[in-house]
Image: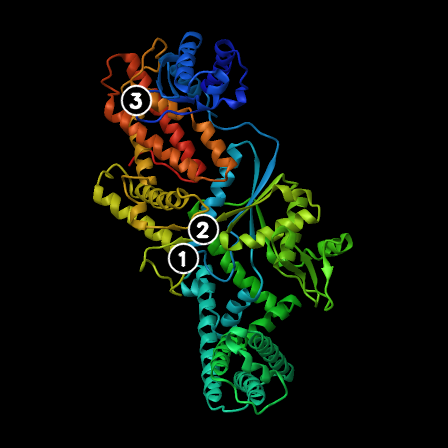
Amino acid sequence: MIDIESSLQQTIGQGFKELFGTEVPVTDISLQPTRKDFEGTHTFVTFPFAKAAKKNPAETARLLGEYLKEKSHLISSFNVVQGFLNLSIADEAWIEVFKSMAADPEFGMQPSNGQTVMVEYSSPNTNKPLHLGHLRNNFLGYSVAQILEANGYKVIKANLVNDRGIHICKSMLAYEKFGNGENPESSGLKGDHLVGDYYVKFENERRKQWNNIKEKAEREYKKMYLPHKERERKQIDIITKVIIDTYKSDNENAKPVSIDEYDKLIRSLLEKKYNDIISNPSYIGNTFESLLKDEPHVEIPYEVKEFLNEEFQKLINESERLVPLIYEAQQMLVKWEKGDEETVALWRKMNGWVYEGFDQTYKRMGVDFDKMYYESNTYVLGKDIVEEGLAKGVFFKKENGSVWIDLTAEGLDEKLVLRADGTSVYITQDLGTADLKYKDFGMDKSIYVVGNEQDYHFNVLFAILKKLGKHYAEGSYHLSYGMVDLPTGRMKSREGTVVDADDLMEEMVQTATIRTQELGKIEEFTEEGAKVLYEMLGIGALKYFLLKVDPRKRMLFNPDEAIELQGHTATFIQYTHARISTILRKSEQTGVEKQFSSLTRLHPVERDVIALLATLPDRIKEAGNNYTPSVLSQYAYELAKEYNRFFAEVSIFNADTAEEKSFRVALSAQVGKTIRKSMSLLGIQVPERM
């Protein structure tokens, strides 16, 4: 295919040499799209080169324009606006460009570059269904994977499932206490929704326990009029006693060790808070210095008393994690880690239900994975990397035996990588998993699709990998994306906080069904065909709306706006594709010839459509380089708009000549193919009829 831009750059470079006696590297010569209010398609800005040409910008542009028109068969005309040289490409050149792209079924796609990239996305917890945030994550990850494949990469789509930990044990414990043998079949629920209901049940029961403890503790605290030393001891005793009493009342066989653990936790927590109090001069003032001495009968100043009251409330809130139900969940996690048969069997059963539910959700989303990783297999990884880091002097041990890394030089903090008791933290696991993934696939790049609340975590992870000398660190990238909000009052879940992905997808399909039926024109569809169409429109609208916004931005998802037939929506683009398919069917039925070899003239709107079609390779490259599917969603929208302008301004089947008719049908086919390809890279299907 004629590379118009490259050819023009070469000729402009030659023009500088012949006209002005100066060498300008081709790499310094760039062209930009001509503004819509000026004639032309390509614009060369001469201001930066006026000094080299020893002419003012307008004169430089004029001379170059005349040179190009004489020397290049690509240029039909030019105009100068100050120092802007606007170039119009000859119709014959556009026709050759069109013929080349129409003859290439892989137009826009790059050949293999020999590199492998892993795109890790989804990463759900197995204690509840996927939610609205997961929709953006999955659509983004899948689309980026498709786009990178179109850019010549071998792509591995990976999913790291968070299938272990305290959050999983919460659902398991609630099911053990309240499940009575319920299962997805008996409940009529998807497995992930059933397990999610028990997670909600756990949280509700925990809240009840905590409210009981809090009320008792606050009543006792209000009775106190004691010097500060006794007051401190009383605070410890009250909270510890209430928690222990509550635990005993719920657990007849409570062991003394659990009581001791509660006592230690409360005391250490309160000691930390007390240290905060005595080091805060804005609340304490000079009179508080006497409280630091061993004088138990000193009266506490009013402002300090108020501060202590505030701190007590904070202490109460932070102690919430110590309620008996939480303790039981922690004990269940310990049993799981020790391989207790009953606990592991329950874990496998409930996770199995969740995976069946996830599979249904992923299928409806239209996403898939090449490799599944499970935290239950990877959480022990990374400890050998810690040993490696200690040996290299990258990590250091503190007196209590915990292992840390100092990242202050990188603008980060000191970071714990191994606890004093030898247990790992999340960063340890991620170090091990990164190593495992590289051993499995030896990829050149590793893309983590994770929300922007984890920005700091990934900065730390990549900094550690670099300090350890892991060569794959350079290819690691965090594709950070913003949260998705819904209009106020829309679609509250059972918890009232998070919208389930299944519920939102179902609402979108139902909305598409109602809107399509209201418009009519579905008489040609069978009942099954209509269902396929509604699904395509509803899920397509959802995907497109979530992908058309730059992933780094927080966004507001409006279900009503997403399904509109007009505007920046998938429905508008899908309708345009269906319109083109109708035209192509009619051309087959009427026997339109596919020959336009002697065509030399184009309508202005035809030029514009070809020019836009020709940018597909650059748009795919841009989307891949920046991991931004919104580039292609915008392109598909622009192309659909331009085609509808073409459809309004020229007649296809009543064209003046047979060649014009043939060309316009072929142009329509190429637009349809390009829309289909662009939307496919977004993971969106387009219908043949609507």
On screen, residue 381 versus residue 517, left or right, reads right
Image spot of residue 289 (x, y percent): 59, 81
Q: CA distance from mark 3 to mark 2?
A: 38 Å
Residue 239 locus on image (x, y percent) = 54, 83
Look at 31% across and 25% down and name the residue there: 584
Q: Tell me what residue is drawn at x 54 percent, y 63 percent.
A: 349
State the residue position of label 3.
605
In the structure shown, which secondary structural element does the residue marked by tag 1 occupy? Answer: loop
| Disc 1 to disc 2, C-alpha distance | 18 Å
Residue 350 visible at all: yes
Tag 3's secondary structure? Answer: helix
State the quadrant of the C terminus: top left
> Which color scheme did the rendering employ for the protein?
rainbow
Kind of residue at badge 2: Gly
335 vs 375: above or below: below
Q: Residue 587 got which mark? A: none
The answer to the question of whether label 1 and label 2 lie on touching residues, with beta carbons closer than 8 A, is no
Residue density around tag 2, few if under 14, some if 14–19, many if 20 or more, within 10 Å = some
Disc on the earlier residue, 3 or 2: 2
Which amino acid lies under the numbered mark 3 shown in the image of this protein? Val
Q: Amino acid at mark 1?
A: Asp
Question: What is the distance, in whole Å, between disc 1 and disc 3 at their CAs?
Answer: 45 Å
Residue under label 1: 500
Identify which residue, 293 or 549, lies in the foreground.
Answer: 293
- Residue shown at the point (33%, 11%) measured from the top left: 599
Residue, far right: 391
As drawn, the label of residue 482 is: 2
